[in-house]
Image (cartoon, rainbow, N blue to C red):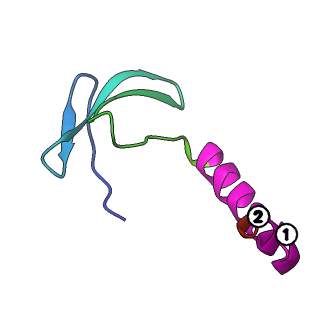
């Protein structure tokens, strides 16, 4: 992991097309702004983990019989 120090108003660039800016610092909370192309999804980590868990669950719930019914209908 790369760790960088930034002050309010300072930014960093990722992959030439994503800009992350420190907007505000209050105590132990930091507000950041992200400029990125619309096709790049941006999630908070806890939301991303829920999405991944839901995807894994959906894949394990599919039985071969259910898939056969789906494709042979």
Lateral position of residue 33 relative to residue 46, left or right: left
Tag 2 residue: 70
Lateral position of residue 29 relative to residue 46, left or right: left
Q: Nearer the viewer, residue 17 or 58?
A: 58
Q: In the rendered image, which quarter is residue 37 located in?
A: top left
Q: Is residue 14 above or below residue 72?
A: above
Q: Position of residue 47 (x, y in %)?
A: 63, 43
Mark 2 lies on a secondary structure that is helix
Q: In the rendered image, which quarter is residue 25 located in?
A: top left
Q: Are the two marked residues, 1 and 2, in contact with CB atoms closer than 8 angstroms?
A: yes
Q: Is residue 32 above or below residue 67?
A: above
Q: Position of residue 28 (x, y in %)?
A: 54, 32
Estimate the spatial distance between the alpha carbons at disc 1 and disc 2, rounded to whole Å. Answer: 6 Å
Query: How many C-alpha atoms fall within 10 Å of the one at disc 2: few (<14), some, or many (≥20)?
Result: few
- Magenta highlight range: 46-69
Lateral position of residue 30 relative to residue 50, left or right: left
Query: How many C-alpha atoms fall within 10 Å of the one at disc 1: few (<14), some, or many (≥20)?
Result: few
Residue 66: which numbered mark, if any? Answer: 1
Magenta region includes residue 61: yes
Residue drawn where x is 44% and y is 40% of the image: 42
Q: Position of residue 55 (x, y in %)?
A: 69, 59
Mark 1 lies on a secondary structure that is helix
Residue drawn where x is 51% and y is 41% of the image: 43
């Amino acid at each position: 992991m790369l760790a960088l120090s930034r002050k309010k108003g300072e930014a960093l660039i990722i992959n030439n097309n994503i800009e992350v800016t420190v907007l505000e610092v209050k105590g132990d909370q930091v507000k950041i702004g992200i400029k990125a192309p619309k096709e790049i999804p941006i999630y908070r980590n806890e939301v991303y983990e829920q999405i991944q868990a839901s995807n894994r669950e959906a894949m394990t719930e599919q039985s071969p019989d259910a898939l056969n019914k789906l494709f042979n209908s």
